[in-house]
Amino acid sequence: MLHYLQIENFVIVEQLKLQFNNGLTIISGETGAGKSIVIDALSLVLGERAYSNMVRQGCETAQVNAVFHLPLAAQQWLEQQNLSHGEECFVRRVVNHNGRSRAYINDQPVSIQTARKLGEYLVDIHGQHVHQSLLKPDIQRELVDELMDDKTILQQVKNTYQAWNKLKTELKHLGGEDRDAKISLLRYQVQEFENFEVTTQALEKLETEFRRLVNAQKLLENSQDALTLLDNDEAGGLNKAFNLLEEMQDADSQLTNIAAFLENAIIHTQEAIGELRTYIHNLDLDAERLQDVQQQINQLQDLARKHRVSYAELPKYVEQLNKQLNELENYEQRVVNLEAKIAESLETYKQISQILHKQRIKTANTLSEQITKEIQQLGMPGGKLTIKVKTDQQAAPSPTGSDKIEFLVSTNPGNPPKPLQQVASGGELSRISLAIQVITTESRGVPILVFDEVDVGIGGGVAEIVGQLLNKLGQQRQVLCITHLAQVASQGHHHLQVSKKVLQQTTYATIKQLDYQQRIEEIARMLGGIEITSQTLAHAQEMLEHARVQ
């Protein structure tokens, strides 16, 4: 849950410190007061994009700090990132006046992507226009897929599609009208390397030989000097030392090991002298061979530059040229092989897509029942939502399968279900969207839920039911809700009021935690507007008391 939020020089907030508790926290205020500032700040600290206009006018930086109590999944993820600090987490975001920003988790600098990933474990934010996206077919499909018991099948469909598509692309680029021209070019390119053995081992061998030949004179001189030193010493110090110690071994056994070391040294020295003589005898000072090797290396380097690859990349490059040429020259057989693989891959895709289709139908039926139950409680007593899953046999394979998913709704008993965008009004769409959000939220288990005026387009008794629904959610999760409806606000466990004032042509936004009496006054304002009467206050108090005893 969110414990603490500190905001500095953010938009029209100069300094703000807020403590948060469990349950449903209502955020209200006059239109234009800046009710969304808390949500915007929370989104920013958890990785949303930063803009220069987020920095308060005249300030260099804006800063948002937040303290969270972490669910187990978030703790484990932070441990994997070496960012763990126990059950609590301190997150900070600093935005410069030029729009650039920095993010920190537990005082360690992190990427914005890391902060955003942490946010996925902590917060679900449902914006006031989220219901509009519900009309999009892709969003309807994603809602069903998100609630499937086994999401791995969707990844399998994606993988098989990618394998099929890769083969199709390979077949497309294999032939074509310019195949003869490609073959001619590849043959010419391959022929350029025919006089060379272009393998990794061959190039390494060529370079080794070049280094030996170019240093041959120095190698000969040093080897001869070393041989002279060893020859002079062989009959000298080592042998004399060994003979002296060998005579005295009987007098002191401690000399035995030392004498043995010297004896081995003499043997190894003699072997080294023999090897060195052989090496000198075989050492090649062939200047012509050196010139030939150097010429080969220069020619290969020239070819590497011509073909825009590095010298070290030549073996792999030549191998690719030969492979491409072989495929094109054996075009007919390659086509047959590819077409067989494509057919096999397509059949696999269809089989897995059929499994996905069955899972979607099962999930859609369950989701339809759940949404229908919720919308009937939200002022649509005869409403029914049906999710239709149909395989499009004519559709080309796609990463998400071949299903067409459509949300159909009947707002009145007896009416046949029709597509959502054709029959649902703005208010009805808001209620359906809210029902879906509640259901999907419960499936995800994210601890903090944020609703930004998702109650738009509803009122009266329905608004009270929405408030009760959010109150119920607040008993399981921490819920923040921006609302302009008194019926929703009265259901909150806590209440924050946002207000705005202008001093010396500078705008300031403030937020305060309301006590019981202040809540009555704020709810009365939401009910009655500018003029608040005693009846309005009494009504506000009645709403609060009624919410308490439910």
Image (spheres, helix red, strand yellow):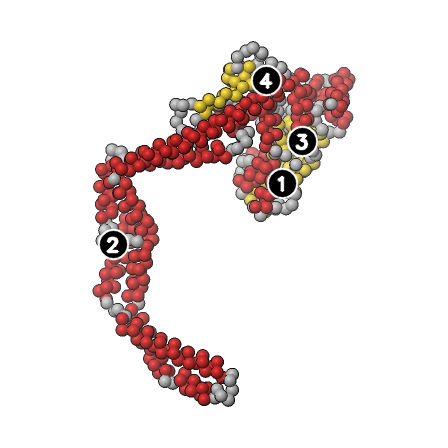
- First in sequence: mark 3 vs mark 4: 4
Residue in view at x 22 percent, y 41 percent: 184
Q: Which element type, helix, strand or loop, lies under badge 4? A: helix
- First in sequence: mark 1 vs mark 4: 1
Q: Report the mark closest to the observer, 1 or 4.
A: 1
Residue 382 horizontal side relative to residue 239, left or right: right
Residue 462 horizontal side relative to residue 367, left or right: right
User: x and y percent of residue 108 in the render?
Assistant: 59, 47
Residue nearest the observer in this picture, 531 or 197: 197
Where residue 264 sits, quadrant-wise, is bottom left
Q: Is residue 322 above or below residue 508?
A: below
Name the residue beneath numbered marker 4.
427
Q: Is residue 359 above or below residue 272?
A: above
User: How far separated are the C-alphas under marks 4 and 2?
Assistant: 77 Å
User: x and y percent of residue 359 in the render?
Assistant: 51, 28
Q: Report the mark closest to the observer, 2 or 1.
A: 1
Residue in view at x 62 percent, y 17 percent: 376
Q: Are marks 1 and 4 in contact (CB under 8 Å)?
A: no
